[in-house]
Amino acid sequence: MNWSKSAMMACLCAALGACATQPPPQTPSVALPAGPPPGEPAWIVSMDAQGLRTAFGQPAFVRKDNGSEMWRYDGPSCKAFFFLYRGIAGSTVVRHVETLPRGSSIAADETCLALLRQHPTSSVLNAPNS
């Protein structure tokens, strides 16, 4: 009977050992899209909220989250997303802008921004604070 217990233990150890030598299953890797190019148009950096409204009119959409804001402007062929944060003086200022489609050398396409400045929007939808 001792022999059968030993044989059973040996088989059990061999089976467990075989499982341990199997490589873990490979998970398919998904490439992330490239981030936007760095840099901002010089005339927009640190523009305050009032200056942004004066230049582009009322945003089509505003989202406020924990002291930051995202303003979206919609044009017929592009969209601009302005990201505003509290500045040193306490006013809300632009820290980043992106457009869709993106610019070639920076995240904001100057042609899109110029188009949106020519046709400022007049309506605003505000998202609740999230």
Image: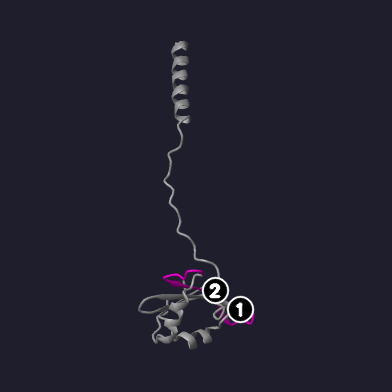
Residue under label 2: 40
Instruction: Using the numbered discs, state the Cα–Cα distance from disc 1 to disc 2 in whole angstroms.
Output: 16 Å
**Residue 92 screen position, x and y as percent:** 56, 80
Dot 1 falls on a residue whose secondary structure is loop
Compared with 32, 65 (above or below) is: below
Which numbered tag is attached to residue 73?
A: none
Q: Is residue 106 above or below residue 3?
A: below
Q: Secondary structure at mark 2?
A: loop
The amino acid type found where label 2 is placed reads: Glu
For residue 13, above or below residue 83: above
The reply to whether dot 1 and dot 2 touch (C-beta < 8 Å) is no
Residue under label 1: 87
* Percent coordinates x, y for residue 113 in the rendering: 46, 79
Going from the N terminus, do you reach mark 1 or mark 2 first?
2
Residue 72 position, x and y percent, is 43, 77
**What range of the chain is rendered magenta?**
88-105
**Amino acid marked by disc 1:** Gly
